[in-house]
Image (cartoon, rainbow, N blue to C red):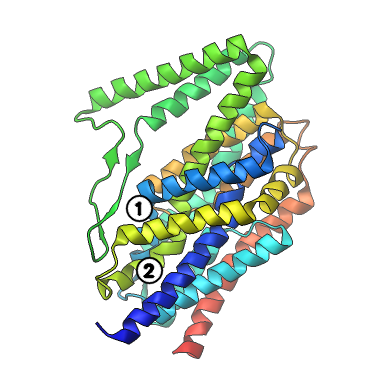
Amino acid sequence: MDPTTILLFAVAALSSLFMAWVIGAGSSGATPFAPAVGANAIGTMRAAFLVGLLGFAGAVTQGASVSEAVGRDLVVGISLPATSVIVVLLIGAGLMMIGIVTGYPIATAFTVTGAVIGVGFALGGEPAWEKYAEIGAMWVLTPFVGGGLAYAIASVLPRPDVPERVSVALLAGVVGAVLANLEFVFLDGVGGTLVAAGSPVLPLDDAGAAITISLLAGAVAALLVWWDIGRDRTGGLRRFLLALGGLVAFSAGASQVGLAVGPLLPLLDDVSIVSPLAVLLGGGFGILVGSWTGAPRMIKAISREYASLGPRRSIATLVPSFLIAQTAVLLGVPVSFNEIIVSAVIGAGLAVGGGAGVSPRKLGLTVLAWIGSFVLAFVLGYGSMFVVG
């Protein structure tokens, strides 16, 4: 094997590891437990520790879907060479670092997607319009769907005519039904092959069985939460909130790892000695270390600066966040966890006295940072190819 190829792959792999660290320190490591920290259900350092472990598990068991999309589906007709992969990852990580230092959550999905498309176009690739439509729909709808659901849930939970023991249990039932249908998709073998179909938690052969098992799983989850809140209302709410934070952290790892390791997948066709599973493990490890070492700053920024939420409205934030995150993983769409969580936090915050706990200035600057990060990443990716190449 050509030593130059191996060297370039090694540099690209280190760039990918750095990107994974930045993701863990930023969006993936900060956002899942931020509402729980804001509700005083868990401490900042403990949250960072748990989100690292759960993010690693999600990266390895569900990370292949988004990884494949980022690595092979964003530009048609070309495969990114090693130098281009390095450029993409350094651009994405660099912009993310700016977000971490300034305290503004830059959207990782926007930066990496913009850089990949910009680099791909500069190399003569063609637009993947169908994938762009799918990604664009997810990005545009996420604030409205996530924020709307969070607003609706946060408006119902405090109502005296809706018993909290029942309303929260129903939410737990929805989450339980979704859990019964999660799929674990792995990168298998050597050379970047993707398993054609995922492995459901409960493999079912027909729709009737799937509906039955989903309803049963939902009922079990609802009964457990109903019983727990009945014997200890405050403790039950906090335990359910922490369980939701764990599920969102797991989903964050599943989605975000693809932004770090996805660009590496085309290189595995030339470096056949490296297993795609090893690449996922490396990305998951980078997210874990980033969550442990760099996430606390962003956790504080998101949990305390956007809205002041209690346990109930934090639950309202995390339920739609989990549902949207798993939808993105299922579709193989790179999505920003900052956008998911922040939109839901704002929606829940608006249910509190019309948004008294929400900072309009912070929200406006965050949205501009999201849009600007995509445009800047695209321009930097496109322009860098003329310098590199």
Percent x, y of residue 131: 38, 59
* Amino acid found under the numbered disc labelled 2: Leu
**Residue under pointer 2:** 264
Percent x, y of residue 289: 54, 56
**Residue drawn where x is 60% and y is 19% of the image:** 236
Against 280, residue 8 (above or below) is below
Percent x, y of residue 304: 75, 43
* Amino acid found under the numbered disc labelled 1: Ser
Element type where label 2 sits in the image: helix
Element type where label 1 sits in the image: helix
**Residue under pointer 1:** 65
Labels in figure, total: 2
Q: In the drawing, what numbered circle is on residue 182?
A: none
Query: How dense is the environment of label 2, judged by Cα within 10 Å: few (below 14), some, or many (20 and up)?
Result: many
Query: How dense is the environment of label 1, judged by Cα within 10 Å: few (below 14), some, or many (20 and up)?
Result: many
Q: Is residue 216 visible?
A: yes
Left or right of 150 on screen, residue 124? left
Q: For the N terminus, which image quadrant? A: bottom left
> For this rendering, which residue is in front, 234 or 87?
234
> For this rendering, which residue is in front, 345 or 121?
345
Q: Is residue 375 visible?
A: no
Against 175, residue 97 (above or below) is below
**Residue drawn where x is 55% and y is 44% of the image:** 51
Q: Earlier in the sequence, mark 1 or mark 2?
A: 1
Mark 1 vs mark 2, CA separation in Å: 14 Å
**Residue drawn where x is 20% and y is 28% of the image:** 206
